[in-house]
Amino acid sequence: MRLMIIGHLEGYISAAGKIALQRGAKVIHCEDCEQALGALRNGKGADLVMIDVKQKIGVFIEALRAERIHVPVIACGIGTDARSAVKAIQEGAKEYVPLPPDADLIAAILEAVTEESNAMIASDPAMKQVVAMADKIAPSEATVMITGESGTGKEVMSSYIHRKSKRGAGSFIAVNCAAIPESLLESELFGHEKGAFTGAVGRRLGKFEEANGGTLLLDEVSEMHPLLQAKLLRAIQEREITRIGSNDAVKVDVRIIATSNRNLEDSVNKGEFREDLYFRLNVVNIRLPALRERRSDLPALSQFFIDKFSEQNGMDKKRISAEAAAKILAHHWRGNIRELENTMHRAVLVSMEDEIEADAVHIAGMEARMVSPPAATAPAATGVSSAETEKTVQNPGGVESLVGKTIADVERQMILNTLDHCLGNRTHAANILGISIRTLRNKLSQYREKGIDVPEA
């Protein structure tokens, strides 16, 4: 983890820095916000910023937003009154740390804010094979493509490969290609010069330069626009990039790891993804199994999340009961590890017993997702499954209600209903609908232009 500390703090900075170093962090110290912004623009990245409460925290955080530099900020101060601490939180700081520093407190906040974990739970045979492959190829310089359903832990595996590689002491920089608008992703990857476009108030190094000597993760690379794919291919082949607004090529030494939850071969066949880029990225392919394919890991993963959220919420750690474990093992886990994590977080908060009881493990729609459903009865004899019968009963006249509507109307209703079901999460909705995140965004833009309400992200 990379920690940036901003301010003087009467010598306590060195104490806080030493604590962070003992916890494995790399520390950089900046005198003020301007120096810190300059360091961030020039590739001295940070996973967390600790800033003196006397600095202009609001202005600093607003500058980070304007330049699309995503890093959590926590405030700290010596003998600061409650009003200053509250103001710092209101201006955008995630936490406030009183100084002189307490080692346990700083360690807890570092863990809570960055949510870093080096745990790799892999006792299931299917996952053991994956980890063995990762261990074997990690020391090489080969480009790696990690595939698997959404929520299977592709970024965690990417970080694991980085730590096991010869570049483990270097930076690990992740870019979510699906979360950044197409118009900004090029600048995010390759950087820009001052004045290159509106809002470019200074030179900024891109993720390629920031990851120099380390590893660059291109998360959900399948969502990248074809025009940008060509520039990415050149950067990988030539090992050099050109910042927006500049004609000078910059050499970079970066190992690429890419991830995708889609079938990239299908995307290549459809013309949505460049074939040459696919072969360049897919030197080594690691497919992560879905959670339902590694069921023997479920108890250990569940307990890991229970311990994690118990500590975060200041609650006593509990074991999971046999009844709750059986309920977890019976579920299909369509949302994979992400769904399990959210379920265990809720269970920790609502559990009323000495152990996590079965009633605390609330799984929406579990009856419809059982791995081993009860044997079909009478409806099966007629060639209709019990699930189909249930759908027919629960949605009488469903098809008839569509009569008279255009295909566009039905598509819009389906997209908006799915988005609402996913609480505005674009990535999840696109996965359920079977379309790319880019297609979903284009559809939503069309709806907004027509004055149709679209759920917020």
Image (spheres, rainbow, N blue to C red):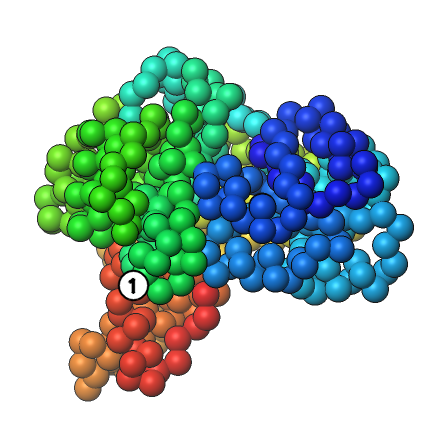
Residue identified by numbered label 1: 440
Residue 408, compared with residue 144, is above or below; it is: below
SS of the residue under disc 1? helix
Residue 85's quadrant in the figure? bottom right
Q: Is residue 432 visible?
A: no
Residue at 83 percent of width and 64 percent of height: 83
- Provide residue 385's location: percent of width, then percent of height: 31, 55
Residue 388, compared with residue 40, is above or below; it is: below
Comparing 36 with 143, the one in front is 36
Q: Is residue 416 visible?
A: yes
Residue at 30 percent of width and 77 percent of height: 447
- Provide residue 10's location: percent of width, then percent of height: 82, 41
Residue 72, compared with residue 215, is above or below; it is: below
Residue 229's quadrant in the figure? top left
Residue type at numbered disc 1: Leu
Residue at 74 percent of width and 27 percent of height: 18
In the picture, the quarter occupied by the N terminus is top right
Residue at 18 percent of width and 81 percent of height: 406
Q: Residues within 10 Å of mark 1 (few under 14, many from 20)?
A: some
- Provide residue 194's location: percent of width, then percent of height: 37, 54
